[in-house]
């Protein structure tokens, strides 16, 4: 519903401008009509057009207000300020001045005795005047008739056709009538509405970043100047038109002004675009070393500067103790084969796709040595969802330098919570994660060896080589301006792990099963688990309190998100399939979008699946479920949580996720913005240790945004104004679908400089990134081209 309003808002922004363009042209050209009759007709038409334009303007204003009402003031305040307010003012002017002026004109142009219909012969005669009479065939002296094709009237052109037919011509437009038609009250308000709707449309497609006061006043001032200039111009024009001997200017003269205007507009917009393009180039270096240079959003809390300055490179895990568990992850570039046979030009950890699953125990000291053998892009390892100390977070240019070929880096941390997580490189992540630099990370409770079947199911769309007769399949990244560049390209095939086929797993009836679903892609994925009731035991590694049985529900997992499902194996088969997979086919449309329900893939069935069945069962494979989506908002049973309806917060942040037409890093595109800005211009969220923080997300763009906060987990308070009523819903990767509004809370208990970004890694690469900055914490690392650190 709300997402439709947002779409309509964009659409009508443009339509309003177009419509007012016609209305303005009509109003301006009225006075140059040649016959009273055509003037009258045009005046009526103009009035109709004006009324329609006014209605559409009202609709447009209504949309902005409806959005502010439905999605909250922060989600639409810019639309209200930059569009609704000036449009209302301009529209009121048009309604109050132009409409009466039109009515006056229509009354004045009424022929004497207009109440009686014109005699039929006159009608016929008039319609016989050739349209091609061009430069004023009808505007002839004061005579009531002219011999068509005969002698040339002043300013007239001989009409074609047989000579000697006497044609009556309607009275010409008198100077006085032209005066009325050129009334500034008629013309100017309509042209001002046009100018306003153009500016309003531009500011809807490319809204300025806060604060809005400056741009708002500038817009009003600009429009006031335009209005003033138009009044002066129109007064002069009226004087000209009302001069007795006025004749319509020649075609050439009439072309001069629009040509000049068009040229000026073209030059100006080229200049503007060049400027925007230049401006959008990312700085070669984005310094965190002095991140206080960057703007902060204080969320209503105290400004920066209260806490002592400290360098995040001191915020490591235990450095000297003996590790309990040790792994080495070696990154290499090579072509690898999936179990199902497809080849991938891969970047892989330890030569496996995905990387090896790491299983560790909560609280133990884990050491991972990262070795980069030959991945030119550079490598880091980020522990997605694990709240590690800041210096172990693995973000190039923020918490470390990217590891170059031949280099290594040691991570050490104690995972604080059991659950399902994953790891991936955070250097050029949009390009390298697709190709394989990721794996699953499972943290187990100490002393609780999983019984039964405990299996991690990592879903990923692999860019596979070669056609294999599937040349028509979905590709990615060929999409031109709207999609930006793409790291991998190629045909995408979704696999569970390394298999794009159905994998059969023998499971004795009665076995407790836990499937850990990891979505290692950009878009949300929808799963069907058919053949058994099941429970959602954990979300993003956080146990659900008292989960209940679900039957027939589909499960949607955010890009980068996880969900654990548990059940007891029945006597028949249980089938896990993917029923909605935007990753597989979204790119085929040239728009790296995820689609409304995370399933552009209508018509394309993913073949990867997992079939669990007792050996020798003959029961048929169950059909995929089609029930409603599982909703965590009211699932499970409430239990103690640090935040509730009565909580007070030290900081309150509002993040509006949007679209903006513009340039990003020198490329024209539909940008993914946070509060109308893109990285590195999105102000960092400033907190100090111990703060309780509330953040709202509103998605007014046309795609899903899985918002991922590093180093912290967020408690969902409400969605679309409806409070969460089930088990506390903790998440680190929250999918915010178009039109959705979430409120979340977290405790600032892990000091550092943290990424907070959309985990559609293409969106992140295109600017949908900000930081959570603890007061006083600085980073010695630099991001940007010259530093070699490109986290996204
Ligand atoms: Cu899994 Cu910053 O990402
Ligand atoms: Cu996004």
Image (cartoon, grey):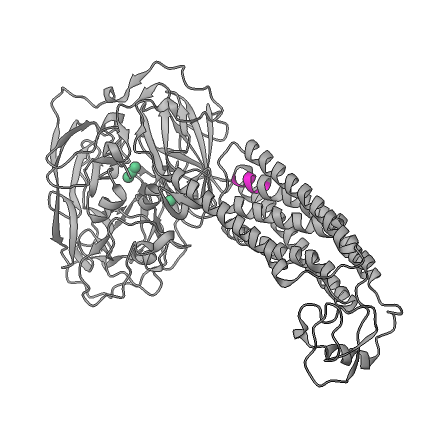
- Residue at left offset 83%, top offset 57%: 176
Look at the image and tell me whether residue 396 can be seen: no
Quarter of the picture containing the C terminus is: top left
- Residue at left offset 39%, top offset 36%: 728
- Residue at left offset 67%, top offset 43%: 229
Left or right of residue 240: residue 451? left
Which residues fall within the magenta stretch?
Answer: 75-80
Q: Nearer the viewer, residue 652 or 182?
A: 182
The rendered magenta stretch, by its main secondary structure, is classed as helix
Q: Quadrant of ligand 2?
A: top left
- Residue at left offset 61%, top offset 39%: 222
Classify 237 as above or below 649.
below
The quadrant holding residue 421 is top left
Asked whether 76 falls inside the magenta stretch, the response is yes
Q: Nearer the viewer, residue 547 or 39?
A: 39
- Indicate the position of residue 8 as horizontal and vertical percent values: 54, 53
């Amino acid at each position: 519903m709300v997402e439709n309003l947002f779409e309509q808002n964009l659409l009508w922004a443009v339509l309003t401008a177009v419509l007012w363009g016609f209305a303005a042209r009509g109003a301006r050209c009225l006075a140059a009509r040649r016959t009273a009759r055509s003037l009258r007709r045009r005046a009526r038409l103009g009035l109709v057009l004006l009324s329609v334009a006014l209605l559409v303007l009202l609709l447009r204003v209504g949309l902005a207000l409806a959005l502010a009402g439905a999605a909250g003031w922060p989600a639409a305040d810019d639309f209200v300020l930059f569009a609704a307010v000036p449009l209302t003012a301009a529209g009121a002017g048009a309604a109050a001045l132009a409409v009466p002026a039109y009515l006056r004109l229509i009354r004045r142009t009424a022929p004497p005795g207009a109440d009686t219909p014109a005699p039929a012969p006159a009608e016929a005669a008039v319609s016989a005047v050739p349209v091609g009479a061009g430069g004023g065939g009808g505007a002839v002296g004061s005579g009531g008739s002219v011999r068509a094709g005969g002698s040339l009237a002043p300013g007239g052109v001989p009409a074609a056709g047989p000579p000697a037919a006497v044609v009556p011509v309607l009275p010409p437009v008198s100077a006085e009538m032209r005066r009325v038609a050129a009334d500034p009250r008629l013309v100017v308000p309509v042209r001002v509405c046009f100018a306003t709707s153009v500016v309003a449309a531009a500011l809807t497609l490319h809204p300025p970043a806060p604060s809005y006061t400056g741009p708002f006043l500038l817009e009003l001032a600009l429009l006031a100047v335009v209005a003033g200039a138009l009044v002066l111009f129109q007064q002069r024009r009226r004087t000209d038109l009302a001069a007795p001997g006025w004749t319509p200017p020649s075609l050439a003269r009439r072309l001069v002004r629009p040509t000049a205007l068009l040229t000026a507009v073209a030059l100006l917009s080229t200049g503007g675009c060049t400027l925007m393009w230049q401006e959008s180039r990312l700085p070669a270096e984005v310094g965190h070393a002095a991140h206080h240079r960057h703007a902060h959003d204080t969320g209503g809390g105290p400004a920066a500067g209260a806490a002592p300055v400290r360098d995040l490179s001191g915020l490591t895990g235990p450095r000297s103790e003996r590790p309990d568990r040790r792994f080495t992850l070696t990154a290499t570039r090579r072509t690898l084969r999936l179990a199902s046979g497809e080849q991938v030009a891969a970047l892989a950890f330890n030569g496996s796709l995905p990387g090896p699953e790491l299983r560790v125990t909560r609280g133990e000291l884990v050491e991972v040595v990262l070795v980069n053998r030959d991945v030119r892009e550079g490598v880091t390892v980020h522990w997605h969802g694990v709240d590690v100390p800041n210096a172990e977070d693995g973000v190039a240019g923020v918490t470390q330098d990217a590891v170059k070929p031949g280099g290594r880096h040691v991570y050490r941390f104690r995972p604080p919570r059991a659950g399902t997580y994953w790891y991936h490189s955070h250097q050029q992540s949009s390009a390298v994660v697709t190709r394989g630099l990721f794996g699953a990370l499972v943290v187990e409770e100490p002393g609780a060896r999983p019984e039964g079947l405990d299996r991690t199911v990592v879903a990923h769309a692999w860019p596979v080589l070669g056609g294999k007769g599937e040349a028509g399949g979905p590709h990615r990244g060929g999409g031109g301006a709207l999609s930006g560049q793409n790291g991998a390209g190629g045909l995408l095939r979704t696999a569970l792990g390394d298999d794009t086929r159905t994998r059969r797993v023998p499971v004795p009836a009665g076995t407790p099963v836990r499937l850990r679903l990891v979505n290692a892609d950009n878009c949300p994925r929808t799963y069907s688990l058919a053949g058994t009731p099941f429970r959602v035991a954990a979300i993003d590694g956080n146990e659900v309190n008292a989960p209940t049985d679900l039957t027939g529900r589909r499960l949607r997992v955010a890009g980068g998100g996880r969900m654990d499902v548990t059940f007891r194996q029945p006597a028949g088969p249980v089938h896990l399939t993917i029923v909605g997979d935007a990753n597989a086919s979204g790119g085929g449309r040239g728009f790296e979008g995820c689609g409304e329900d995370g399933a552009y893939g209508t018509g394309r069935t993913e073949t990867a699946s997992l079939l669990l069945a007792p050996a020798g069962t003959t029961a048929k494979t169950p059909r995929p479920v089609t029930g409603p989506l599982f909703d965590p908002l009211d699932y499970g049973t409430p239990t103690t949580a640090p935040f509730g309806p009565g909580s007070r917060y030290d900081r309150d942040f509002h993040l509006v996720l949007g679209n903006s037409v513009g340039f990003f890093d020198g490329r024209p595109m539909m940008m993914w913005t946070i509060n109308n800005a893109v990285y590195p211009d999105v102000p960092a969220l400033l907190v100090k240790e111990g703060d309780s923080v509330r953040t709202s997300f509103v998605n007014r763009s046309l795609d899903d945004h899985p918002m991922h906060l590093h180093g912290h987990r967020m408690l969902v308070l409400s969605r679309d104004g409806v409070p969460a009523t089930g088990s506390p819903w903790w998440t680190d990767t929250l999918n915010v679908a178009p039109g959705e509004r979430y409120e979340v809370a977290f405790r600032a208990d892990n000091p550092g400089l943290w990424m907070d970004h959309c985990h559609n890694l293409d969106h992140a690469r295109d600017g949908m990134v900000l930081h959570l900055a603890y007061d006083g914490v600085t980073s010695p690392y630099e991001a940007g081209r010259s530093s070699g650190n490109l986290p996204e």
